[in-house]
Image (cartoon, rainbow, N blue to C red):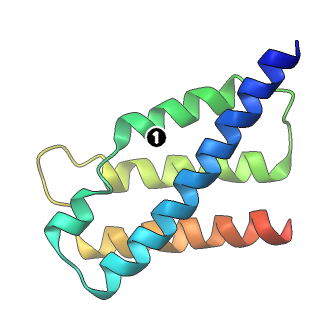
Amino acid sequence: MNEVHDEKLSQLVSLGGWLRGTEVLTSVVKEHFSADGAELLHQPDLLSYFQTRLQAMPEFNLPIIHEIQDALGEVKPLIDVGDRHIPPESVKKVNDITTRLDHGIVTRD
């Protein structure tokens, strides 16, 4: 039982690291936009993984978890662009979303 709980907590920590890293990356890329920089955001499979993991954690029925799930749903179409480049507007939107989440996680709003 503890191993399962520890695994889920470690997945939440990984998700938090990804969110914070994405916030930092998008803040840099939006200030000095390049297609190569924006391409670093092209991680739809990782986003799908986190979405699936969160759905498998009903015991973490907290408002911030629901906000994260909703935000991942907002981010996915912005970064899942196939062979196209991620445009500057999408980088800004992803930054806005991850900044909002970071604030919500840190302040528990």
- Residue at 34% across, 45% down: 43
Q: Residue at x 64, y 71 (%)?
A: 100
Residue drawn at x 69%, y 22% is 56
Q: Position of residue 86 (x, y in %)?
A: 23, 62
- The vertical placement of 65 against 87, above or below, is above
* Residue 84, placed above or below residue 2: below
Question: Where does residue 63 sit, x and y in percent of width and height?
Answer: 83, 51
Closer to the camera in the image, 40 or 98: 40
Locate the C terminus and report the quarter of the image it occupies: bottom right
Residue 94 vertical placement versus 4 (above, below): below
Which quadrant is the N terminus positioned in? top right
Callout 1 amino acid: Leu
Instruction: Give the class, few, some or many, for how many residues have Cα within 10 Å of label 1's Cα (few <14, many ≥20).
Output: some
Residue at the (26%, 75%) spot, across then down: 88
Q: Which residue is mark 1?
A: 47
Q: Is residue 15 left or right of residue 41?
A: right
Left or right of 86 on screen, residue 52: right
- Horizontal placement of 108 versus 96: left or right? right
Placement of 47 over or under 5, stated as above or below: below
Measured from the top left, where is residue 92 in percent x and y? 39, 76
State which quadrant residue 4 falls in.
top right
Viewer can see residue 109: no
